[in-house]
Structures are given as C-alpha cells and as structure tokens.
Amino acid sequence: MGAPGRPAGGASGQGIGASMPRKEDDRYMRGRGQYVGDIKVAGMLEVAFLRSPVAHARIKAIRIPDAIRAHVVIADDLEGVKAIRADTSLPGFKSSVQPALATGKVRYVGELIALCAAPTRAEAEDMAAEIEVDFEPLPAVVDMRAARRPESALVHEHWGDNLYLTTFVDVDFEAAKAKAAYSVTKELVTARQVMSPMEGRGVIAEWNSRKGQLVLTTSSQQPHIVRTGLAECLGLAEEQVRVVSPDVGGGFGYKGILLPEEVALGFATRKLGRPLRWLEDRRENLTANANCREHHYVLTAYADANGRLLALDCEATVDSGAYSAYPFSACLEAGQVGSILPGLYDFPHYRCKVYSVATNKPPILPYRGVARTGVCFALEVTLDALARKIGCEPNDLRFKSLVQPHQMPFDNIAKRHFDSGDYPKALRMAIEAVGHDAVRARQKQGEKDGRRIGIGYAMYAEQAGHGTSVYAAWGIPFVPGFEQSQARFTPDGGLELRIGAHSHGQGMETTLSQVAHEILGIPHDRIKLVHGDTGETPYSTGTWGSRSMIMSGGAVAAACDALAERVLKIGAALMQAKREDVRLENGFVVGPSGRMAVTDIARTWYRRPQDLPPDVDPGGLELTAGYKAKRDTGTFSYAAHAAVVAVDPDTGATEILDYVVVEDGGVLVNPMIVDGQVYGGCAQGIGTALYEEMGFDANGQPQASTLSDYMLPGPGEMPDVRILHLETPSPYTRWGQKGVGEGGAIAPPAAITNAINDALKDMGVELTMSPITPRRIVAAIDAASAAAPLGGKAA
Amino acid sequence: MKPSAFAYRRASSLSDAVAALAANADAKIMAGGQTLGPMLNLRLAQPAEIVDITRIPELCATSETSDWVNLGALVTHAAIEDGLVPDPTRGFLARVAHGIAYRAVRTRGTVGGSLAHADPAADWLSCFTALGAQISISGPTDTRRVPLHGFMRGALDTDLAPGEILSAVHLPKFSANARFGYAKFCRKDGEFADAIGAALLDPDRAIYRLVASTTAGAPIVIEAGAAFAPEEIPARLDAAGSTGDSYERRLRAVILKRALAEAMGK
C-alpha cells in the first residue's frame, strides 16, 4: 500500500487499504434505505405520462377531455420553459433541441407528450388513456448506417443529414500498408442495451413558498448538475432550486442525466399547485429511457512480419438516438471511440473515423464503461482474428504490442497519457491464474458431452477522474474543476464530511470515512458523510467517470489535512507545547508531555472558547478545501480478463466455466469494495456479451417492454469471478489511487467472445456481435458448415 | 403501470366462484396471480371483476385412489417441489417443479393456473401431458373430467368454456419400472423455456410417450413404440407438425432427445 511494508489500513487497520465492511450496508441490508419511492409529501399527486406510441410523426392535434384538462400539462402549457440542450464545442457538432414535452414532432417511441397528475398512479394512467393525439406519420430512421445515406429521412430536418458529429484522426496511416505482412478486416456490432438499475428513475417536485425554492427530490448521481440544468430550463435562478438525491438504487450513468421528466415535473408542480411524484416503471425504463451502447465498426488491423501490431484503421458508427442528452451530449460515446481504440498497445500507424448518428430511438446515454465496452470488444476480438491469421496464440500478438512498463508514463498514438502500470505482467498473471496450458490440453482431449471448450482474453485501460483540461476541449455543458469537501467537527467531537458527489453503491460513506480516519484518527462511528443535497454540499459535477475516489477522496483528504492543522495548533497551545512538537495519533494530539483527545479540542472550540489561545484561527473547526490531481488527464487503471467457456454446438448455449480478472487500480482504499465493483461490472459485461439486447422493428418500435423480453443475467449466470490485484500507484493522485468503478463492465464481452471463437475455431466459426445468443451461435455454425461442406476450415 | 379499476370478490366455495363467473361475463378468476398480476399491471387484462379463488378449501385438497393422484387446482409448484403432496413419480415431479421460474413464483403459482393459462412454455403442460394426466373442469351444472391432451387448443387458448374453472389435476400411477425424463432449454435460470422435452417410458403398461413443447401452440405428443430409436425424433416431430424456424425445430428435437436419453438412463 503506497509505502512498502505499511500494514493494510494503516496503524489502526481501518484507514487506507482496509477491507472494512461498508457502513451504509446496515441500512441497505435491513431494507431501511430511503429511496424516492419511499418518500411521501403531504398533498402529493402521482404522475403518469402519455408517451408517443410512434417513433416519428408530426403532432397535428392533442384532444384532452374537459373533465381532466386541469390535471394535464402539455407542451402548449410550458410557459417560460426552455428545451434541454446539450451542445459541445467540437467543430461541426449539430445541436438538438429536446423539449420537456413533445413540441410539433415526436422523435421516438416513448417521448413525453402529456403529464397527467392524480391521487394515484392508476388514476393518472386512466387520464393518459383518455387523451387523443392525431399524428401525421413520418418515416422512422431506425438503422444507424442507413441513416447516414443521403436519401434517409431526417430526424432533425434543418440539419440536412442525420449526423451530430463526424470525427477523424489520421496518424501516418498510409505508410502502414507497405509495411504490413498480415491484416484482417472485421465488421463488429454491439447491440443497443438498456441500463437496468434495480431502482428506476423517480422524481418528487414541490415548491417551497417559505424558501421561494423548487425542491426536486430525484434519483440522481449528479444532483448539482441537475440543479444547473433544471434552473436553466425552468428560467429560475439556481438559488431558487434545491436538488435532493436520497438513497439511489444503482446509477451506472443513467442517473447522471437531466431528464425531460424532471423539467416537466419542476414546471407542473407550480402550475398545478401540488407536490408531484413520478416513479419510472420498468416499462418506461426499458422502452423509452435508459438506452445505451449500440456501436458498429469496420475495423482493419495490420501486423508486421514479426507478428507485432502495426496499424489500426477504423470506421465506427454510434447510434446516438433522437436527442443529445444533458449533460454528456451525443458525442460522449462517438467522440471517445477514436481516442480509446488503440487500447494498451504501442503501434505507429492509425486512422479512425467515427459518426455520431441521430435516429428515431431514445437518446443513447452513458453506461458504465461508456464507449470503452464497445471499443474494447471491437479491438480485442479483431486482434484475436489477426492472431489466427498470423497463426499464433493471440497473447503472443498482445505481448509483442503492449506498452511496456519501462515506457511509463506513456503518451499513446491517440495522445492519451498512461500514468503507470505493467500491462504485460497483468496478462502473464491472468494466463497463469486461468491455467492456460491446462485449458489447451483439455481442448485437445475433447468433451464427453460434445461441448467445445475455448479460452479468450481481453485487456483495456480505464481513464478515470480526468478533469478540466480534457473536458474544456469538449465544451459540453459542464467542465469539472476543483473538487471540494467541507469538513467540520461537531461540539462533541464528531466529524461531518460534505461532498457534492453522490454515493449509490460505491461505498463512499465507508471509503471517505477511511480517508478521514487515516488523517485524523477519528473512530469510524464518529465520521458522517453528508451527500446528495445541493443545499448541504459544495458544488460538484457529481459521481461519474470513476472519479469519486480520486476527486472526492482527494478533497476529503485536503479538508482533513487543513482541519488537522487547526486541531494541532489548538492542541499545542492547550498543552503548552510548540506546534512542531505535536502530532495527531489515533484521535489524540500527542505532545512531549502528554496527549489530548480531539473531542476535547472540539469541545474547547465550541463550548469553552475562553480557553483558546489568542492567535487561534477564527475559522474554527469547519472549513472547505479543494483538490485537483497533480495532472488532470486522468488515471489509467487497467486489467487483463480471461474467460473459459463451454459451447454446446447443438443448442448454442454458452457456459462460462472460469473467469479471471487481473486488475490494477493503483492503491486500493478498500480492496473489498473494489472487488465488489469488479464483480458487479462483470455481471453487466456478461449481460452485454450474452444476454442484453433492445431490438427495434423497422417502424422504430422497441421489441422488449418487460424483463422477460429484455434478458438480464441473474445469479445463476454469474461465474465465480476470481480477482487478482496489482497495485501500481498513480503518480498524480493523493495516495496513488486510480478510478476503478467501470472496468468490470468493459472487458467481458471481448474476453467471452474471444473464448467462444476459440472454442469454435475448428468449425470455421467467428462471431463478431454482442450479445452472442444461442440462436446466433447455431446460425454461425450452420453458415460455416455451408461454406465448407467437406468439414474443412472455412477460408 | 398500474391496473385499471376492477371489483374484487373472494369466493368461498367452488360453487360460489362458478356463480360469480356466471353473474359477470367480464369477471376473471385469480389463483396464484403470477401471470394475471403482471397482465393486470400492464393493462393487457382489464377485467371488471377479479374473483379470488385462493381461499376455496376444496381446490387446495389432494387425494389418492389406487390408480390416481388427485391434486386440487390450487396446489402450488412449491408444494410439489417440497414433496408436500402425493407424487406418483417418485420424485420426478419435484425435480420438474424445482425448475419452474423462481422460488417466489413457485410459492404462489398453481398447477391449475398454469394449465388454464396455457402458455406453450409452461412446464406442467408438457410434463403432465407426458404423464397422461386428466383434469376436472367445473361449470355451472356439473364437473367434467377430460384428458389434458387435447385441452389446450393453442397459445393461451383452451377448451375452457366461459364460466368454467379448472378445478383439479389427476395424475395416473405408474408401474415400478416406469422411467421419466425431462429436459428444457432456457437462456437463463428461471426464464421461460425455449424448448421442453418430456418422456415417460412405462414398459409394463406399454407406454412410450414423448412430449415436446412448441412455441406457438399445444405440445406435440409422440406415442413411440418399444423399438423407437432416438434418431427418429426429428422426423417424428416434423411429421407431427413441428412449427417454427429451423433453429426452433432443431432445438426441440435436441431437447426431446435429451429427455428421452434421461428416461432411458443414458
């Protein structure tokens, strides 16, 4: 842990590096969490929305029966409300305008048309069913590649095409061709998915006339960003808006978005004069809201005669859906493909063109891993194909091409700055842990049940906690700057920490307590983290991008450092010692002639100020401190994943027999929580690899509206993931910690696909889509055997 | 989503329930509610009245004769899984029950509800058909007892007339040499099956019955002979009108073969 020989958790065993049980689990595991759905406000009405049943149409008329008109809000009622806009400053970006309630046109199935409020949700749904809308149908833009063609219908007519943005990077690509000895070109597709937190979105809006304030209680991972966006849309000053985010049942990116539902409720609570609550149900979540992923790639990988990666040439398309979502924009995925695609590899030639396309589908939103899951899939599956072309083990190609530890820190071909790590070592550890040679031996023997065994690997780096310099260049609605924390002692010696980020599964009520304990030595039961309320916490862009342990952790440390200094000064004076002769130890100021509890110093400040030294800092035992990493281009945690699968060629079923993760998250503040993040991420990655798919028909109708149609992996589908750690400190962060929140979700689709392709390679089968369903495996086997009727390998 | 408004009535006896259905053509009975509940929530079903039959003692009862085991329609999957009701198959039924959906569903879901709903992917439909089960159907005037095979007319479509209630399931007893096989293919634990195969081999009674679920209708029943070879399965299924695309038809054959292999002890 940082310093060699330092015990995990420091002297007390409860600081940085301790696998402490999570403090917040006491309420979660007893069912005592408090979510939006648990909160009731006097006089509150429940909201149901009338949503568009069609993907693309002009609204000709909306007819609302007089009997319910006073309980319904439509676009015509939204006086003074601005549409949601999430622009970027990237050259050529085309702006979309997302109205809170559909105005003139609907652009996807599920778009909001009318807000209906009633004492119960059922009655509100009855109201919605009474509203009639006349539509003039327009052709739906459903297929992202067809949407790029000039003859396509247009989602936003005034654009002239369906492209939010086209990005292009070329690093001496043409020179590669002459040097290339091998190449493969693959077309790869990742399905559109839906984020599925156990708790959907939920919003309570109420106007507090005493404070002159809209209070929006919402299931959000970025309450301050919601406040900023909401104030702008509603035409309110920010001090007139308070956003409270209570317990949140899973975020994954979906809870970082300013929703039109939030704007609509924020407006309607004043118009209707009643507190309003909307609880997203699973059908709304699936069909209208939490869409993500959907990429398409044509990727060519080149190797030189030595079997080393020489170049990548990529054309990628991202289906960004109908609107640019606030605050991350319609370019978060597409804009990052080109910079993530080189992976962990060092190669000299590169070209990548990426299209961010508008379609008549729900906006694509950031999901754990963001663009990396698709990019890692495209790159690592193509590398395995290139290795098969070369005739080598895929990991031979990887070892020859990985950035080496002596090159660190390393600026890669896409100008990403890798801070630290030993990539080959992680891969070697994965190979050993998974028992690579034994799997190869077992493959040769064959399985009695007719299944085929395969082994596959994938690697990635996860940029995390990147800040001002990166986001200023994007020009999206927010740019993260200094992260702040407030720290204060209570009169009886307790410590309150306030952060603007939000903890909803990350365990920050525990890990930030560990940070404070490390510095101040206060017992954990006297440390309280306050988060999730813009009225109580410093501004923050929130919890996203695996940043919180770096940024909030750094801010809490800075605040505790400053508080420690004030405590030491008071303690030294009270003990009649010099400042330089006292130190903090286990919650005591220890000096040459004795020690004094921090609780006594707190009591002195608040309740016996007559005892304080005359030169005491008048700021007292309460302060705000800020933090930014020494270099804000981000930490790069990374991992090697290895999967062993058994594929049943008769049914197409895939079973994951073994799964190994070798992960380097720098210094781990709480290794148990990191493992939990990896397990959870892997479950989602397995969903991407084998199960999850939101299809749309040619009219843009979503093809799954319940979880029996949209298949998520369950406990029975989770292998016993084995996790090994490397701990290479980041040179840029407070303790060398790196962000690790998303990694588990990045590599599984690539590793599992590589394992399936390894299992079926003798049948000439190669799958390049996610999810790999039983039906797709059988179809690929059929296609391969049709292509090679004599049973030989397909060309 | 939440259900549209409906009236609720708890029936005290089978005749009370039948009378309630007769009195209101737009009434729907609810047993375990594992299918009707979601359908109400999604407003796919909007009955005017729900007749709750879960407190009717006679529908919970089980009994045995020398040739039959009789299960009231309200016997739950969990009761079978836990061995709380008579089992003429020496544990086979418990294993099938264990594979139905999730324990929470099994705790409330009933055999009668499952058969009456007639989802082609339902386990009991294929399993009980293979066993040669009969069912009792109670109406305003009498109770009729019919073979389960033939009861299902198509997906979600049965021989139940308006106002009738499926009141009991009757399972025959088997010889000591009877062997059972069951296989199903689900993309994940607890999901609806893409294919189910069930086999009953009772040579003492010259029964060699194979049953395969379909995706769109009643299960396919193959009355095989003693000399039947597993390789005949695809052709027999096709001859019986096996529907679906090539993947579905092949999967059906693979899974039925696995059920037969299990019954044959292979």
Image: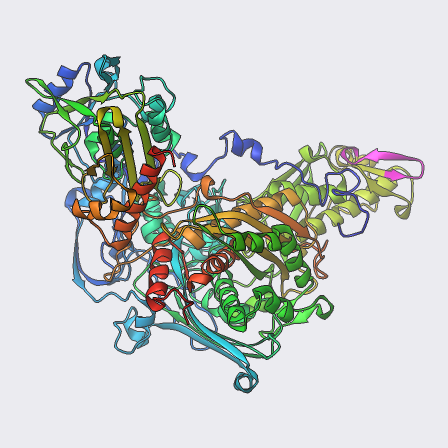
Residue A762 horizontal/vertical position (percent): 45, 62
Identify the residue at horizontal 39%, vertical 52% (top origin): A692
Q: Which residues are magenta?
A: A590-600
Q: Nearer the viewer, residue A617 or A358?
A: A358
Residue A619 horizontal/vertical position (percent): 73, 47
Q: Which quadrant of the figure contains the C terminus of chain A?
A: bottom left
Answer with the quarter of the image where residue A304 lies: bottom right
Task: Tell me if residue B183 is in the magenta stretch.
Answer: no
Identify the residue at horizontal 46%, vertical 60% (top origin): A757
Residue A82 visible in the shown view = no
Answer with the quarter of the image where residue B31 lies: top left
Task: Tell me if residue A599 is in the magenta stretch.
Answer: yes
A502 left or right of A93 in image: right
Q: Nearer the viewer, residue B243 or A52?
A: B243
B264 left or right of B243 in image: right
Residue A28 horizontal/vertical position (percent): 52, 34
